[in-house]
Image (cartoon, rainbow, N blue to C red):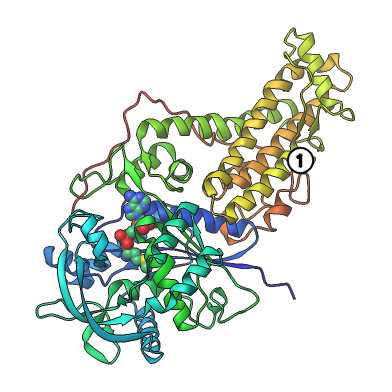
Amino acid sequence: MTEPRPRRYITTPIYYVNDRPHIGHCYTTLVADVAARAQRLMGREVFFLTGTDEHAEKVAKAAADHGMTPMQWATRNAERFREAFAFMGFSHDDFIRTTEARHIDRATAYIQRLMDSGDITLGDYEGWFDPSQEEYVPENVAKEHDFKSPVTGRPLERRTEQNYFFRLSHYQAWLEAEIASDRIRVLPEQRKNEVLGRIRQGLNDVPVSRRIKEGDADWGIRMPGDDAHRIYVWIEALCNYLTVVDTDDRRTFWPRGDASDPAPITHFMAKDILWFHAVIWPAMLRALGERPPATVYAHAYFIAEGRKMSKSLGNFIEIDTLRAYADRYSLDAVRWYLATQGPLGATDADFAYGRFVEVYNADLANGIGNATSRVANMIEKYFDGTLPRTCDGRFGFPDGRAMGVALAARAAAGKAPDDPTRTFDFAAEARDAIGRAARLHESCALDEALRLGIALVNRVDEFISYTAPFTLAKRLAEHEHGEKALATILYSCAEALRIASLLLYPAMPAKMAALWRDWNCEHLADPADPDSGFRAPLGELAAWGGAYGLKAGQSIRKGEALFMRADAAEPAPTHEAPGA
Ligand code: MSP
């Protein structure tokens, strides 16, 4: 019997279906997709969930504005989310709509359990309600924002209602200890401090229901045993993370109690909804006797050409804009730009055409694209497309000869490098990069992890400039070991690029699979569907010249260039204005 692989459960927020998806929704889902692909590559069994949050009042309102029933409108927009995520190449294992029975039934059962345990009780509530966000705003926050929504700036409403409350206050000490000790890791660090600061100010019990009023659309889930109330949309929405895996075959992703195999859960989102995920949800789980998430990661916002995106400015970057970019530069280029330039940390990031072209040319066209085609070209030209030998990837060390031969050829051609004493140890550098990337992925610093792939590509470029294999190739006859040296150099370039491709894969799965086809690397994964399973965990796949490495006699085809250079003078890609 094989050992079960370690598991990871990765989620995105479930998105409101009052409107169509935009870049922000794609960004968080991309971050989760990169994390999921990286975890699979590292040999873990991953369950990656995304979906739509449908029972909000604003969904019913938008539906009415469009002369549709809430369900018709929700279905139409849920479909747009599905399409957008298919276009983005996301590898989610499930897509939950909160209007599905599996969610409704289990979410209702959780609320019932919380009522039974005394964690949810009936009480009176008066406070400032933000209709645009469907949430109550604490008194001090309402005051600070002049009784306007801190998110949209629209007026808050004073509301009094009889409600069911969840006794959040009861979990204050526990939450503070869990978060302070990183048993619930709130990332980035700055967000953890904000959350802890707010917890220490004291936690109020939170309303978990809405009284149904005359004229309300029949939309949302009823409180169990009380038809006069609906479960507050936020409370039922959070339950989705558990409802989807609360089945016999998926419970391993959310093991009960103190199982020794914890299957750490990571929730990704933006900073707007961190409080729900870092405080309210873990407390609900605690009350249910379920384990809390291991990591709650809240990134910042994407803004557009320097301005905050908003409905009133009408400047949301639309999915069609991303499609237009993908048509011109490839989908993986869009994924790369978003993943490496996005607002993963605590500061907002701009989506700007000029920057896109800059990054595209530097990292992709002149980076991995150029390096792979250059190396494949030389292998084709000098060795008929077949690597004659392997090597240990060490250059400039006393026991190796290849570098000396290359430098001698350069000297003979009158092109000696300024510094003839440099060393390159690709096997060690690659091993180091893989180890660092694995650690960075564990702390969700996936942009940094991805950039290690480009750093390795840049080292190969440096090495090619330094050893100038093209100069050596013209002078093979003059050097006793010329051919051997040339083969050794090119093997090292190719093997280093193969390892770099593994580091780049989570962001650019299609392009890296294309490279693996050209370079006959079917032994890494099924190139038609790399997600269906890598043949071994990353450490083994990436071992220099190892069981999954490039072999002597392996043929390397120079396929189509992975990325063509972009011309910054060309106007930005555009698309037709969208409909409703
Ligand atoms: N339905 C709730 C979430 C419930 S989760 C149990 C919700 N939906 S939402 O449609 O408003 O999505 C908010 C999320 O979309 C943010 O947390 C973030 O993940 C993503 N983004 C929306 N706009 C964004 C940007 N401008 N930039 C980056 N991400 C953004 O809240």
Height in image: 88 above or below 244? Answer: above
x and y percentages locating residue 191 in the rendered image = 44, 55
Secondary element under disc 1, as helix, strand or loop, is: helix
Residue 530 seen from this side: no
Residue 82, by quadrant, is: bottom left
Q: Does residue 193 appear left or right of residue 394 in this picture? A: left
**Which residue lies at the image location 55% right of the left edge and 73% below the top edge?**
253
Q: Which residue is drawn at 72% across and 39% down?
A: 429
Residue at image position (75%, 19%) is 473
Residue at x 61% of width, y 41% of height? 452
Q: State the residue in front, 287 or 405.
A: 287
The residue closer to the viewer here, 378 or 365, is 365
Question: What is the x, y in percent for residue 285?
Answer: 46, 77
Residue 65 horizontal/vertical position (percent): 12, 63
Which residue is farthest left? 215
* Residue 222 seen: yes
Which quadrant is home to the C terminus? bottom left
Badge 1: how crowded within 10 Å, few (<14), some, or many (20+)? some
Q: Residue furthest front?
A: 201
Q: Which amino acid does label 1 sit on?
A: Ala
Question: Which of the 4 image quarters holds residue 356?
Answer: top left
Q: Residue beneath label 1, please?
A: 428
Is 470 rendered above or below residue 375?
above
Figure quarter occupied by ligand 1? bottom left
* Residue behind label 1 places its C-beta within 8 angstroms of ligand 1: no
Vertical relation: 404 (above or below) 255: above
